[in-house]
Each structure stands twice: as structure tokens, then as C-alpha cells.
Image: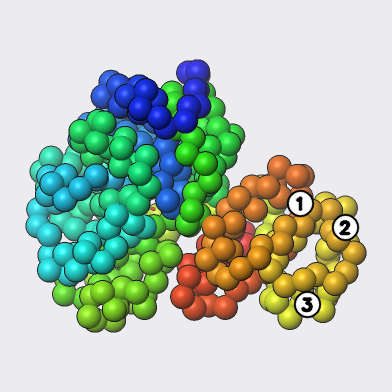
Amino acid sequence: MIHTRTLRPGDKALALAARVLRAGGLVAFPTETVYGLGARALDARAARRVYKAKGRPSDNPLIVHVADEAMLAGVVRRVTPLARRLIDAFWPGPLTLILEKSDRVPSAVTAGGRTVAVRCPGHRAARALIRALGEPIAAPSANLSGRPSPTTAAHVLRDLRGRVALILDGGPCREGLESTIVDARGRRPVVLRRGTVTDEMIARAAGIAPAPPGPAAPAAPGARHRHYAPSCRVILAPPALVRRGALAGLSGPSAGLVHRTPWPGRPPAYALRVRGGAGAYAAALFSALRGAESAGVETLYVETVPDRGVGRAVMDRLRRAARR
Ligand code: AMP
Ligand code: MG
């Protein structure tokens, strides 16, 4: 067990964080998507510590975070014309690109693969940390493997207390869902994981509609593993049932509801109503799952959203959270 400190990401804390990383240690930091658990990307031993701290299967590669294009050039073999267009449209931001890795990237980071996942985060503190280190940072989400991704420093502390030296607390994450992952090696983008950068946005920027992942482009390795599972059972509830108050199981003492549509019945033991569109729902989702869990909810009903735009990414996470 190591002592875990939580600090606001001011200049002094960033300098301390860079020292921890340089020494091969781990730092959790805010990004616009979810909190990341960072290590020096060019150091295989440091990267292996990330897997250990999270209890992450070693076949599930990490995302390399860069502060700018000069750093990108150091970790990939070549920036394809497609990657170029997507970078121009979405970086810094919640889009991760899969490209051929350079020899500098250790195979511990890529889980033995020849490709690397790379992105430039839209959060200032994240870029400031990478700059303070002066090197790319490998970082998956800062949760224990299989749990909902963390969108606040408190979530990180709950999962990783004693396993990470320092947590930089930059407040709640703006997007709240993990980055969109696109294989940008070919001419046509292949979406491996949906996020808040939608298929439509990618099509517009790339000038060509994304292809569905085929056998030639396996889904993001992480998609194979169990994900987003809070300790409570998650049941998906269509809006029509919420509107009619037709969720019989909700009357129990340990039931909860996450919803957008007004619930006409007696308020359940735990209720969280999210106001706004699919984007607002995305931003609140993981926090809601963890909130219900902390409140002792055993059965959590979660209202579904239409399966389009950002809603597709939300529904992807929800279906996995509900899978048993
Ligand atoms: P996380 O940041 O925790 O969401 O984890 C990063 C995710 O990126 C993993 O679940 C992987 O599925 C995905 N990923 C990382 N590297 C690659 C790669 N080289 N090819 C495809 N997917 C990747
Ligand atoms: Mg993750």
C-alpha cells in the first residue's frame, strides 16, 4: 500500500506529478472524457504498473496521450491522410486514433500489438501534465478493471486508494464517456468504440462514412472484457415505461432509478433525474451508476435513450452495464 495524495492541478502539483511519473510511478489525472491512470508511455516497467494497479488483463492495451503533433510523430510510424483529417477536426479532444506504432513504444503499452492507440486530450490539465513530463503518457481509465469509469477524483480514490501515488483533482469530467476509438490506418475510418465524437461527425470530417468493424479490424480489445459494472444489478427501462410509472420492481426498498422522463409514481429509494439531451446523459451516467452503488441500491433501473448520435455511445455502455 502506498499513500495516495489528492491535489488540485496547479503548477506545483503538476511539477510533483511529473516527478512521480519520471520515477516510474503512477498519477491519476483529469481528462475531458474520464479520469486516466497515467504512466510514462516509453517505459515498459511503468506501463506494467498500470495493469497491476487496475487489475487489468494484460491483453487490453493502453491509450497513449500526447500534448502535440511533435509527440505524436514520436509514437507512430506514419500519420495517414485519414488520421490527418481527423486530427485537424477533433484534436485536442475525445477521439483516439489507431495507427502503426513506432519502435519507441514498448509492447507492454500495446499489449504486444503493432498498432498504438493515441490521442491528444482536450483537458488543459492533462496537456499541462504531459508537457511537464515532456513525454507521452500511457493511460487507461483510472478505475479498477471492470468497474464504471471514473468521472471525479472521488471515484478514482474509491477504486485506487493505496494503488496510486497522486490524484490530480480537476473536478468532474465534461464528456463523461471514454473517447471514440477509430482505426485510421486505412482509407476508410473504422469505429472500434463509440463515444461523443459520433459516426456522423467522423463521416463529415473524413469525407467518407465509417465502416463497421469487420473481421479484418477486430473490435477494440477492451470490448471483449466485462465493463461498466457497478455492484448493483442494472435493468434498462424504455422511456414509455418510465412515463407510465410501469416499473413494478421500483417499489422495493433497495431499488433505484436514473431517468430523464418524469416518474409519476412514488419516488424510489434512490432517484437521479438528468435534465438535457443525450450529451448530458452521457456526462452523468457513470457518476449515476456509482452514486446508486454508494446509496446501497441493489436493483437500478436506467432509462434508455434513442440509439443515435451520442445516444449510441450511451446505449453501448448501458447494454454492457446491464449484461450479467
Ligand atoms: P480505456 O482507456 O480504459 O478505455 O482503455 C483503452 C481502450 O483502448 C482499451 O479498452 C482498448 O480496447 C483500446 N485500445 C488501446 N490500444 C488499442 C489498439 N492498439 N487497437 C485497438 N484498440 C485499442
Ligand atoms: Mg477503461
Q: Residues within 10 Å of mark 2 (few under 14, many from 20)?
A: few
* Residue 90, x across and y down, in percent: 29, 63
Q: Residues within 10 Å of mark 1 (few under 14, many from 20)?
A: some
Q: What is the CA distance from the residue labelled 3 to the residue labelled 1? A: 22 Å
The amino acid sitting under disc 3 is Arg
Q: Are marks 1 and 2 in contact (CB under 8 Å)?
A: yes
Mark 3 CB within 8 Å of ligand 2: no
The amino acid sitting under disc 1 is Glu
* Residue 106, x across and y down, in percent: 19, 39
Secondary structure under tag 1 reads loop
Q: Which residue is mark 2?
A: 252
* Residue 324, x across and y down, in percent: 62, 59
- Residue at (33, 69) in percent of width and height: 191
In the picture shown, does residue 53 fall above or below 89? above
Mark 3 or 1: in front is 3
Tell me, yes or no, if residue 61 can be seen here: no
Secondary structure under tag 3 reads helix
Q: Residues within 10 Å of mark 3 (few under 14, many from 20)?
A: some
Q: What is the CA distance from the residue labelled 1 to the residue labelled 2? A: 10 Å
The amino acid sitting under disc 2 is Gly
In the picture shown, does residue 148 fall above or below 39? below
Does residue 75 appear to the left or right of 288 in the view shown?
left
Q: Which residue is mark 1?
A: 298
